[in-house]
Amino acid sequence: MDVFGPSILVLITGLSIGSFLNVCILRVPHGQSVLWPGSSCPQCGTPIQWFDNVPLLNVVWLRARCRWCQGRISWRYPLVECVNGLGYLGLAHQFGFSMRAVVYALLLSALLVVAMIDFDHRIIPDAISLPGIVVGLVASTFVLPLGWVGSLVGMTLGGSVLWVLALLSPYLFGKEGMGGGDIKLLAMIGAFLGWQSVLMTLVLASMTGAVVGSSLMALRRMKRGEAMPFGPFLVGGAVVSMFFYQDVIDVYVALW
């Protein structure tokens, strides 16, 4: 079966949606509409025409600059487009051209937006995580093999484990622990992926967070005790779990 054509279509779809995700990343933290007005240059405010808003190609033919003011176009815009496009392609390869892949593509895009917003603003908007929990429950009931029971258990575990940690943190570590955004994010991940993936996500996020935090302190890029956004690490752990859950389990079993 020739899958080249459908794969190209999936990639283009992912890149195009990635362009819209950039709008969400910029506007959602400020409570602005993601639909109106259209995109504009961050430097001069000139509306971007459709022919200058083609994913990736706009960076190439405009040499990563605004057509009107010649201001630099951030490298993050094409990065988000590429990550989303390649993620969609990976999902199609992993799960076929199926409704399951479509649901996971929705989750992947939501996670990408969350990671970038948390990195920039240290917040995880309820406008993404709360509807995401509902979508995860519905999708698990009708589309995903997880089922509504598995989704409910995953959501409950995802929310409760960080909630308990947040309650205990002042007594165990002498400072506030996880924020409410992290709690709701992990609940959303559990609603889509189940309790096993919640545990893997949390373990991977904690490990990578510790490594990155220690490295930044060793390089004197971060002070001891300084807060670091945990959302991007949860997102990374969830993506690894979504794609490679069984592979990670097999490696762990082989090591032990």
Image (tube, helix red, strand yellow):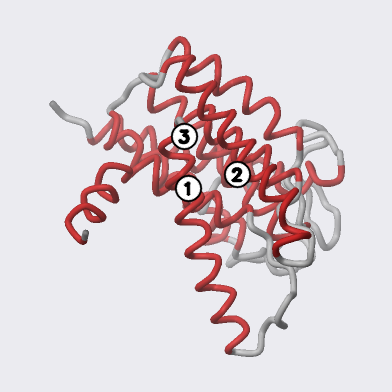
Q: Is residue 145 left or right of residue 68?
A: left
Residue at disc 3, secondary structure: helix
The amino acid sitting under disc 3 is: Thr
Give above or below for 254 relative to 31.
below
Label 2 or label 1, whichever comes before in sequence order: 2
The amino acid sitting under disc 2 is: Ser
Give above or below for 92 relative to 175.
above
Question: Are the residues flagged by discs 2 and 1 in contact, CB closer than 8 Å?
Answer: no
Question: Are the residues flagged by discs 3 and 1 in contact, CB closer than 8 Å?
Answer: no
Q: Position of residue 9 (x, y in %)?
A: 37, 33
Q: Position of residue 42 (x, y in %)?
A: 80, 58
Give the farthest residue toward the top. 142
| Neighbour tally class for label 3: few under 14, some 14-19, many 20 plus, Cα within 10 Å | some
Q: Position of residue 211 (x, y in %)?
A: 50, 73
Disc 3 marks which residue?
A: 13
Residue at disc 2, secondary structure: helix
| Neighbour tally class for label 1: few under 14, some 14-19, many 20 plus, Cα within 10 Å | many
Q: Position of residue 190 (x, y in %)?
A: 52, 33
| Neighbour tally class for label 2: few under 14, some 14-19, many 20 plus, Cα within 10 Å | many
- Give the alpha-carbon distance from disc 2 to disc 1, as whole Å: 27 Å
The amino acid sitting under disc 1 is: Thr
Residue name at image x 59 percent, y 33 percent: 188
Label 3 or label 1, whichever comes before in sequence order: 3
- Give the alpha-carbon distance from disc 3 to disc 1, as whole Å: 27 Å
- Give the alpha-carbon distance from disc 2 to disc 3, as whole Å: 10 Å
Q: Nearer the viewer, residue 252 or 169?
A: 169
Disc 1 marks which residue?
A: 201
Q: Is residue 2 left or right of residue 211?
A: left
Q: Which mark is residue 19?
A: 2
